Amino acid sequence: MKLFLKEKCKDQWNNRGMTVIEVLIVIILIAVILAPTVNALSTTNRIWSHNSAINPCISQANASTLWISREIRGATRPSSTVDSVLVEDGGQRLIIYRYNETTSEWEKIIYQISYDNQLKKIILSESDPADIISAAIPNEGDSGWTTLLEGVTSSPVFNRPANSRAVEVSLQVSDSGQTNERFVPFNLASTYMIRSREVGAITGAGVPDETTPPVVPVHKVDINISKNLFGNKIIDLNDENNKSHDISATIWPANATNKSATWSSSDPNWVTVTSYDPNSLTANVKVVGKFPWYTPYVWFQDFNITVTSEGNSDKCIIRVWNN
């Protein structure tokens, strides 16, 4: 009988299940164990969200200021009455004039803070400096604008103190476009100096503003020959059937007062250079020397042709091959 009662009580104990208190205890223990893990995952997600949002903005802000700094330092006045760098629209627009030597055109570079807090850029080009000065700024919705940075909330962004060559740029970038901001606003500010304030100081003709134009000195003279991989300008001739070649040069700036140049040869006994007109920018190079018959193993010999204008010079190599 005792054995029967003992087995019955054991079966009842095994089949009774968990009480409400025991269930609560288990839930509390699971919560205690999982809380650090959930907190760690939440923190990791916040850090990832913050970095994925702010890092591209920092990179774009740095790239934008780099472009602005380069273009400010290379700015050129298109006229004695128009400055090379202008700040307009209450400091929300920056206009930079420069002369592009590659395309031989004047450029009007415009940085504009749009109504939706975007830093945008557009470049206008004209061959005539008067046309680039009067070129209208396109509407923000027109094609040609490039968005460099979003979330710019500083005002003003651009500033140029009176009678100063310094241009101040201050970019405050925020995540205000999001319902829940993923990072606090950060600032990127710097001051850049305009290197040149003179008309045509780099190259290109400025708009005439005076009855008697000022004397514009020559800044560079360039022989119109492409450089090879080693940075040399070379013309190949020989002492038999390919003895002559025409060459020309270009003077910078384009509005230089003196547009003449002189040519010279490092060895007139071998190679002569003759201008088509006195002080002309075009000339003819001719091989007048000849390799002796007893020098068959001398393959070629180099001679320099130099063009000079107001102390500025450039040279090319005439390579005479032994035929």
Image (cartoon, helix red, strand yellow):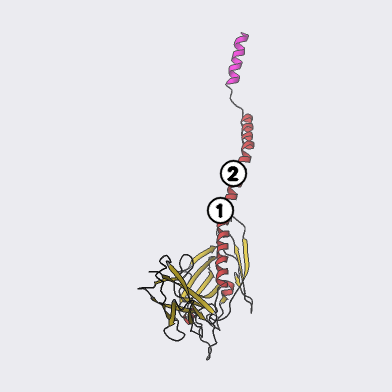
Label at residue 52 = 1
- The residue shown at (57%, 76%) is 85
Q: Nearer the viewer, residue 19 or 36?
A: 36
The magenta segment: 1-15
Which quadrant holds residue 96? bottom right
Whether residue 60 can be seen here: yes
Label at residue 177 = none
Q: Nearer the viewer, residue 164 or 223?
A: 223
Looking at the picture, how far across and down is residue 202, in whole percent?
A: 53, 77
Image quadrant where one finds the C terminus: bottom left
Q: Is residue 11 magenta?
A: yes
Residue 209 vertical position relative to residue 111 in the rendered view, above or below: below
Q: CA distance from mark 1 to mark 2?
A: 16 Å
Helix, strand or loop under label 1: helix
Label at residue 41 = 2
Q: Nearer the viewer, residue 268 or 200?
A: 268
Looking at the picture, how far across and down is residue 220, in whole percent?
A: 52, 77
Q: Is residue 269 left or right of residue 219?
A: left
Q: Amino acid at mark 1?
A: Ser
1 or 2: mark nearer the eye: 1
Looking at the picture, how far across and down is residue 43, in whole percent?
A: 61, 47
Residue that extends furthest to the bottom in the rendered view of this protein: 211
Q: Is residue 113 left or right of residue 161?
A: left
For label 2, count other residues whose C-alpha is less than 10 Å away and answer few (under 14), some (14-19) or many (20+): few
- The residue shown at (63%, 40%) is 36
Q: Amino acid at mark 2?
A: Leu
